[in-house]
Amino acid sequence: MNTTFCLWEYTGVDSVYDVGKLVKDLTTYVKTQTISQSEVILDMYPEGYSLHHNGVWNIIEAVCEACDVHTASITLVIGDMTADYPCNVIIHQPRWLMETAAEFMDFKQDFSKVAEKKFLHFIGRATWDRVGVNKFLKEKYADDSWCTIAQTKHRRRVIDDTFHGLTNNHFNPDQIVDMMQYTLDPPKNFLVETTREDYTTFPDNMLPLQHMYTNAFVEIVHETDIHDNNFFITEKTIRPILFKKPFISMCGKHFLKNLRTLGFKTFDHWFDERYDEADARQRYDAVLKRIINIGEMSYKELSAWNLEMQDTVEHNFKHLLNRGWLEHLDKFDVQFWHDGKGQLL
């Protein structure tokens, strides 16, 4: 059994939990592996967010240099299918796709022809983009939306990350104040009777929402990591696919293009997916424009679109649960990683 360093335990999407502890523990691990002439394996399984964005890669380089270890000699296991680091990269299997296909093997979902609401927007951890879209929907399309966002006022790191996200993406001071007030005191969630733990734990964060998916038109999806070219699929993208709904994605650049490479279909015919060429603030602004376009349409018009989309959403549902995406994983050089043993299967 290989000794690996569980890197994901030390870092969130936007920042490191405790920089000092990460540096200390990683240094000890690298030195121990070097002395025993063992491989340095940094294991992010099951996660896949960018180590460039949160600063972790800079820490890894600094620790390796201090330990006289070249980064090219270490191995990084990560779920971002487009990961690019100057080391031996193992792109691990897409956990959420695999678990959904197993957990919902016999799941049935009828295609819904009529919508009661236009928008779905379900948010756990607050981020600058999630807060912005949730606030926009609540203020402009409250009667046309089912929205939730988690309480944040006691989560200091999340608050700090949201603030830095707003400033780094060039929102003006008044917008930042408004969005931070919304972050600290968001509307209470009355949509489902469930604890926060149930709502954020797979697969319990899927089924309580089925009724709303069945009776709404489109979901605005915010993936775990929206930065750069990150392509890490979680239950956030899987939910609308499982419930046969179209989606607009606040994700990394070319996320939709990469989904199509996996054999899924997206919705360019209806939503103008040129926004997939952008990330961060540019993508956020483009997503808001598409929300406005849909918001201006009547429910009758959206029902007609919905029928036009039936073949696409039915294909995605079957492709997900029949594991059609498996045959495309080699296009991303995905390998199957046993994190418990620190080795490839």
Image (cartoon, rainbow, N blue to C red):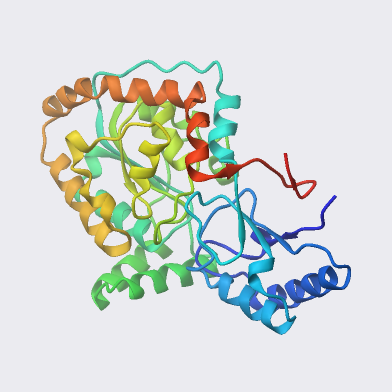
Q: Which image quadrant: the C terminus?
A: top right
Q: Quadrant of residue 112?
A: top left
- Between 20 and 231, the one lying in front of the other is 231
Would you place residue 167 above or below residue 100 in this image? below
User: Horizontal and vertical percent for residue 231?
Assistant: 45, 50
Q: Quadrant of residue 75?
A: bottom right
Q: Is residue 187 visible?
A: yes
Q: Is residue 251 left or right of residue 75?
A: left
Residue name at image x 53 percent, y 35 percent:
97
User: Horizontal and vertical percent for residue 95?
Assistant: 59, 40
Residue name at image x 49 percent, y 64 percent:
153
User: Horizontal and vertical percent for residue 185?
Assistant: 40, 61
Residue name at image x 42 percent, y 18 percent:
109
Would you place residue 266 above or below residue 343 in this image? above
- Between 229 and 210, the one lying in front of the other is 229
Q: Is residue 89 left or right of residue 224?
A: right
Q: How many numbered marks does the figure carry?
A: 0
User: Horizontal and vertical percent for residue 130?
Assistant: 37, 55
